[in-house]
């Protein structure tokens, strides 16, 4: 008869995602993971086998969380250009901005080097671009182009915010996306709610 797990795989990975945010993926040892998870290091070795497999599992969990947040934002915003901007604002976590766009670059490095994680990132990017494109154009090809452009501008705006810190990240994102929308001729059907960032 097998022993039941004292901590489920999902809860364990959620705790280790937080540990990665503290230590970075390259410094997540079994000892540090043990402290964060409340399990013996030997137990973690039994579950994952190798440190590299543990880090991969943790980062895949982080991708799962981002997929869930993206799906919720997609379902909860209007199917128009204003909704595209709102979707990206919902994915812009002002409270965690300093981590996400400084230490978070270390996670991106791991994602790019690992083919499994790189594939997850590519899949998410395609889904995000498609969700944005549906809000920007009825022409499929044009929608794909606009969706990728908007997603790229969003990420670039957040990257430069990490250096400049001249306003709240959501303020910079909204301004950049609205300016881009006007430049490419995408006009939203209703005015944006200036108080949305406070929600």
Image (tube, rainbow, N blue to C red):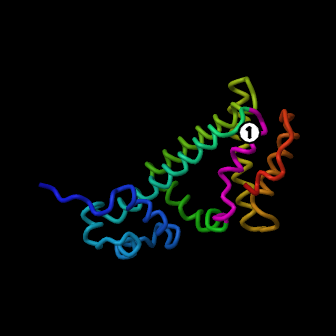
Q: Is residue 137 magenta?
A: no
Taking the spot 41% from the left edge, 62% from the top edge, the residue there is 55
Residue 137 rendering spot, x and y as whole percentages: 75, 28
Q: Nearer the viewer, residue 193 or 176?
A: 193
Direction from residue 61 to residue 82 in the image, left or right: right
Picture layout, residue 147 above or below residue 139? below
Direction from residue 100 to residue 170 in the image, left or right: right
Taking the spot 86% from the left edge, 34% from the top edge, the residue there is 185
User: Mark 1 sits on what residue?
Assistant: 83
Quadrant assignment, res 125: top right
Q: Residue furthest left?
A: 1
Q: Check the picture and name the quadrant holding the C terminus.
A: bottom right
Taking the spot 72% from the left edge, 35% from the top edge, the residue there is 78
Q: Check the picture and name the quadrant holding the N terminus.
A: bottom left
Taking the spot 70% from the left edge, 33% from the top edge, the residue there is 133
SS class, disc 1: helix
Magenta region's main secondary structure?
helix
Number of numbered markers:
1
Q: Nearer the viewer, residue 122 or 34?
A: 34
Quadrant assignment, res 148: top right
Q: Nearer the viewer, residue 171 or 50?
A: 171
Direction from residue 28 to residue 125 in the image, left or right: right
Residues in magenta, as a range: 80-97
Residue 124 rendering spot, x and y as whole percentages: 56, 43
Residue 84 rendering spot, x and y as whole percentages: 73, 40
Quadrant assignment, res 182: top right
Q: Nearer the viewer, residue 75 or 134?
A: 75
Mark 1 is surrounded, within 10 Å at the Cα level, by few (under 14), some (14 to 19) or many (20 or more) other residues, namely: many
Residue 76 rendering spot, x and y as whole percentages: 65, 40
């Amino acid at each position: 008869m097998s022993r039941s797990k004292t901590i489920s795989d999902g809860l364990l990975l959620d705790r280790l995602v937080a540990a990665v945010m503290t230590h970075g993926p390259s410094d997540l040892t079994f000892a540090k993971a043990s402290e964060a998870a409340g399990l013996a290091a030997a137990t973690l070795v039994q579950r994952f086998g190798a440190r590299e497999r543990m880090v991969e599992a943790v980062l895949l969990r982080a991708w799962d969380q981002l997929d869930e947040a993206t799906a919720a934002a997609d379902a909860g915003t209007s199917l128009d250009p204003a909704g595209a901007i709102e979707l990206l604002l919902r994915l812009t976590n002002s409270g965690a901005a300093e981590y996400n766009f400084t230490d978070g670059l270390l996670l991106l490095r791991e994602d790019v080097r690992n083919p499994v994680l790189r594939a997850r990132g590519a899949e998410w990017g395609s889904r995000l671009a498609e969700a944005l494109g549906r809000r920007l154009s009825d022409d499929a090809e044009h929608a794909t182009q606009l969706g990728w452009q908007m997603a790229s501008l969003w990420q670039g705006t957040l990257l430069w915010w990490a250096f400049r810190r001249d306003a709240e990240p959501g303020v910079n994102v909204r301004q950049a996306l609205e300016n881009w929308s006007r430049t490419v001729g995408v006009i939203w059907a209703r005015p944006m709610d200036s108080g949305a960032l406070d929600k």
